[in-house]
Amino acid sequence: MSAAEPFLGPNEALGGVSVGDEAEWERTVTQEHVEAYAEVTGDTNPLHFDKDYAESTVFKSLITHGGIQAGALNALVAMKLPGPGSVFMAQNLKYSAPVRVGDVVRASGKVTKVHAKKPICNMDIVVTATGVRKEGEPAETITVMSGDVAVFRAMPQ
């Protein structure tokens, strides 16, 4: 007896999403984003605002809040895939490198599983940052976050 074949989509409750669907969202991170994030969250860690402090740490310069790169995932699922009405049910995220002001943050997602009837899917995600890592060197792209998420999409009735 063999197991049933997994449902690959399209899932109409998700707006037609299928396993293998992919999307990207990107934005250049500005100092205004860092300030707004601190205002909303209350996170005024000196790693984000005190140049002398940040330069004396392993990071060697100011870094942005990790929530900013995680926020790129919110925009990805809410605006691109699955799309408007989407919220996270679960996140398994690994932060692997910092983001700095001026970096271009790109969130990418690929659907790995869709529920047969409910508006739920799972996605593998990667967030990269493109920017100068060492003064005088060309910009490079590095992975700053990776993991997987479960998403629910609330569609109009």
Image (cartoon, rainbow, N blue to C red):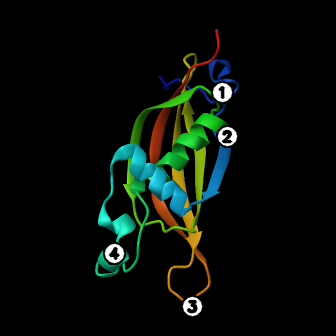
Pointer 1 local density, CA inside 10 Å: few below 14, some 14–19, many at least 20: some
Q: Secondary structure at mark 2?
A: loop
Residue found at x 63% / y 56%: 27
The mark lying in front, picked from 1 and 4, is 4
Pointer 2 local density, CA inside 10 Å: few below 14, some 14–19, many at least 20: some
Residue bearing mark 2: 21
* Mark earlier in primary sequence (1, 4): 1
* Mark earlier in primary sequence (3, 4): 4
**Do tag 3 and tag 4 residues touch (Cβ < 8 Å)?**
no
The amino acid marked with disc number 3 is: Gly
Residue bearing mark 3: 136
- Say which mark, if any, is on residue 54: 4
Residue found at x 53% / y 23%: 4
Closer to the camera in the image, 10 or 154: 154
The amino acid marked with disc number 4 is: Ala
Q: Is residue 67 left or right of residue 31?
A: left
Residue found at x 53% / y 58%: 32
Residue 14 rendering spot, x and y as whole percentages: 63, 24
Q: Quadrant of the C terminus?
A: top right
